[in-house]
Image (cartoon, helix red, strand yellow):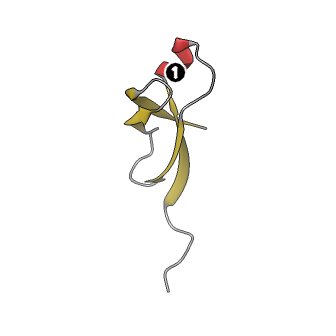
Amino acid sequence: MASRKGNRIQVIMECTEHKVSGQPGTSRYITTKNKKNTTERLELKKYNPILKKITVHKEIK
C-alpha cells in the first residue's frame, strides 16, 4: 500500500489583484504541489468569481 507521507503538500493560493481592487472578500483555492520538485512558491492563473475574470493567484503561507 502507498505511504501517506509523500512529497506532496497542500498549499493555499490567493488572488493578487483582489487585494488592490478594494472589494470585500477574497478569492482562494487549495491545491497540492511536490515540495521536492517545486521549492519556490506557486503562481497560477485561476478564475476569480468576485472580479469575474482570470487573475494571477500566488501561494500564501
Q: Tell me which corner region of the image, top left, top right, bottom left or bottom right, holds residue 26.
A: top right
Q: Tell me which corner region of the image, top left, top right, bottom left or bottom right, holds residue 55.
A: top left
Q: Which residue is mark 1?
A: 18
In the displayed structure, 2 sits above or below 14; it is below
Residue occupying image coordinates x 52% and y 13%: 21
Report how many numbered discs are placed on residues in the image. 1
Residue occupying image coordinates x 49% and y 81%: 2
Q: Position of residue 24 (x, y in %)?
A: 63, 20
Residue occupying image coordinates x 58% and y 17%: 23
Q: Position of residue 35 (x, y in %)?
A: 47, 53
In the displayed structure, 9 sits above or below 18; it is below
Tell me if 9 is positioned left or right of 39 in this view: right
Kind of residue at badge 1 = His
Identify which residue, 40 or 50, lies in the foreground: 50
Q: Position of residue 16 (x, y in %)?
A: 49, 23
Tell me if 44 is positioned left or right of 11 in this view: left
Q: Dot 1 lies on which element? A: helix
